[in-house]
Amino acid sequence: DGGITQSPKYLFRKEGQNVTLSCEQNLNHDAMYWYRQDPGQGLRLIYYSQIVNDFQKGDIAEGYSVSREKKESFPLTVTSAQKNPTAFYLCASSTQMGTGELFFGEGSRLTVL
Amino acid sequence: GNSVTQMEGPVTLSEEAFLTINCTYTATGYPSLFWYVQYPGEGLQLLLKATKADDKGSNKGFEATYRKETTSFHLEKGSVQVSDSAVYFCALIIPTGGGNKLTFGTGTQLKVEL
């Protein structure tokens, strides 16, 4: 079955450590996205990529980094510079930018201890 | 800029009750409108969409009509079930020249009880 796989589902990190969240899709989609979800704040866009080897900052990119070396993969690194990293992170993809029809993974919950 | 405003939750209903979740928007341009649903512990799923004024999106018994005159896209269902308990997000996108990014509302939690 086609879909988006995020891992790990739960992750604990000590302050000062970087952590990388994995996102893989087998939908052959060009565009991929990372969102952060906090209670009562909806979804906020961190980074997005329209094509391999290209990505753009979203609304809250500070303290995060991404890469897009393969069409299927769009990992997100939460760096120690991110001041409040505890959140639920969602990866999504779409056939192309602008459709509004996103397919989401099941999310990764990061807790900083 | 673009924004989406949803009614605050949680909304608590008895099974078989009628559901309305209000959504209004502001947009610079002609948006396409969406409802996404998030079941507990999962990612979001597209529930329905409408791309132009007076269009009605529908899926799984849910409906929403794109009302340009009131800038609204309210979600309705005639008879809710316990399995409809989830968080519902209204969203918009400007398909051309609007940055091609979805703008989400803050979400409305629905709880359906027996």
Image (cartoon, rainbow, N blue to C red):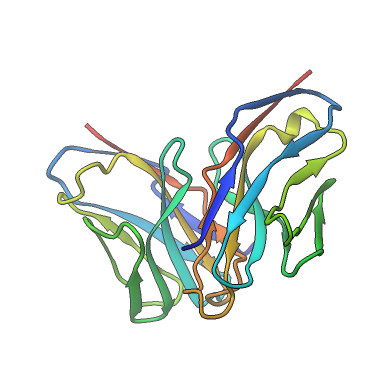
Could you say which quadrant of the image residue B7 lies in? top right
Q: Give the residue displayed 56% in from the left and 76% down from the top.
A: A28
x and y percent of residue A75 in the render? 34, 63
Say whether residue B28 is left or right of residue A74: right
Given residues A112 and B8, the one toward you in this image is: B8
Question: Image height check: is A111 above or below B23?
Answer: above
Q: Give the residue displayed 51% in from the left and 80% down from the top.
A: B97
Q: Give the residue displayed 12% in from the left and 44% down from the top.
A: A16
Q: Residue furthest left?
A: A16
Given residues A97 and B68, the one toward you in this image is: B68
Could you say which quadrant of the image residue A68 lies in? bottom left
Quadrant including the C terminus of chain B: top right
Question: Image height check: is B43 above or below A56?
Answer: above
Q: Residue furthest front?
A: B69
Residue B109 visible to an observer of this rendering:
yes
Could you say which quadrant of the image residue A98 lies in? bottom right
Q: Give the residue displayed 84% in from the left and 27% down from the top.
A: B17
The mark tally for this picture is 0
x and y percent of residue B61 in the render? 85, 46
Residue A68 visible to an observer of this rendering:
no
x and y percent of residue B86 in the render? 64, 36
x and y percent of residue B53 in the render? 76, 67
Say whether residue B62 is left or right of residue A12: right
Question: Image height check: is B99 above or below B50?
Answer: below
Given residues A84 and A94, the one toward you in this image is: A84
